[in-house]
Amino acid sequence: MSDWLSPDVIASAPGRVNLIGEHIDYSQGFVLPFAISYRTTASLRRRDDHIIRIRSQQRVNEVITTSISELVPGSLGEWERYVLGVIWALEIREGLDVEIDGDVPLGAGLSSSAALECAVALGLNEMFSLGLNKKELALLTQKAENVFVGVPCGIMDQSVSLMADAGSALLLDCRDLSTTLVPFDLGASGLELLIIDTQAHHALVDGEYAKRRQACESACSKLRATSLREIDISALEAGKELLSNEEFKRAHHAVSEMARTLQAVEVLRQKDFASLGALITQSHISLRDDYEVSCPELNCAVDVALSHGALGARMVGGGFGGSAIALVAQGQINEIKSAIADAFTSASFTEPRFFTSLPSEGAKVIKKLD
């Protein structure tokens, strides 16, 4: 395998935590994520044929081999589909060796899939001198996941993985992909964002995710709107009779979450972390009750964090498992971690994992083409 040791290009991209603005990127809303320090690296080498070989440093004895001609959306496979989907979306027509490494926790709702896609995409953009900007790469990696892999994700994860900046959260307008960096310095205020991986890896139930997106789209159609971005709470209430109960609840989450996200930007600029915490908790309640994507483990982590002094807490990511976040004073970190671990043991849940991260930089090319 010595021929894997001389890549032409190396690129890396981070996972993310979404501070607030969950399940609204595909409704053209606003989201406020930041990149975490955990990253995925893609080492790429051109071949002189049309063969594609993929392997992971986490599975060094497993080599996945296919060819450019076999890149068909909907193909069966596992994690490698995210790599192949990006090659397909960027319309690469040459063979490649691709080696993946990284430490973004899998199945934790921290967007390991987008980190993988974006590292590969940025590397291919460099290797083949495609000249694509990061907005274009975000749209193409989303296309890879939507069409090739078959997961109807929004644009947030890929955008923040590519466009993030250290020390800031990224306000992303999912309608036009414009971005605004919002300073996010918790340490200076004696705070930390605790990431709680519940290890409830109920793989994101793609069918349930799709149902919620369809309910939002149906609500838009009935309310004669292009997207829920065009509707405020009063308009939604006025049109309630036109919607099924499910459509109303899903749309209510999306519309209220968009408003919360913009409020969060304002209080963050004022360093009003008590108000930020309250908005984060309101987001969880909406995801739990209106969008119904939480689960017992996530609810337990949030409830225990809040009862032990967290300023705010909520589930993050697609839901049905994965991670929660809690905004806490640095001096309370260990107490809250212990309390959550004890509560999980009492409930016979899998032992949780804990992470912390400062807002980190987005995707970058580590080794450029000679």
Image (tube, rainbow, N blue to C red):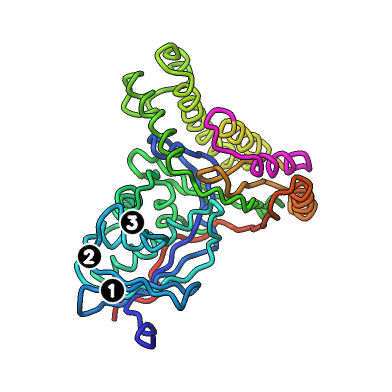
* Residue 163 position by quadrant: bottom left
Q: Secondary structure at mark 3?
A: helix
Q: Position of residue 50 (x, y in %)?
A: 21, 73
User: Callout 2: 10 Å neighbours few (<14), some, many (20+)?
Assistant: some
Above/below status of 220 relative to 299: above
Image quadrant where one finds the N terminus: bottom left
Report whether 29 appears left or right of 291. left
| Of 116 and 8, the residue lying toward us | 116
Dot 1, crowdedness within 10 Å: few (<14), some or many (≥20)? many
Residue at position x 74%, y 42% in the image = 304
Q: CA distance from mark 1 to mark 2?
A: 9 Å
- The relative height of residue 62 versus residue 227 in the rendered view (above or below) is below
**Contact (CB < 8 A) between labels 1 and 2?**
yes
Image coords of residue 20 (percent x, y): 54, 41
Asked if residue 303 is among those painted magenta in the image, a careful observer would answer yes
Q: Which residue is mark 1?
A: 96
> In the image, is residue 285 part of the stretch drawn in magenta?
no
* Residue type (three-letter) at the residue carrying disc 1: Leu
Spot occupied by residue 3 in the image (x, y as percentages of width and height): 34, 86
Identity of the residue drawn at 33% across and 41% down: 176
Magenta residues, start to end? 289-309
- Camera-side residue of 139 and 268: 139
Q: CA distance from mark 1 to mark 3?
A: 22 Å
The amino acid at mark 2 is: Ile
User: Which of these two is toward me, 88 or 364?
Assistant: 88
Q: Which residue is denoted by mark 3 in the rendering?
A: 134
> What residue is pinned by disc 2?
92
Q: Residue furthest bottom?
A: 2
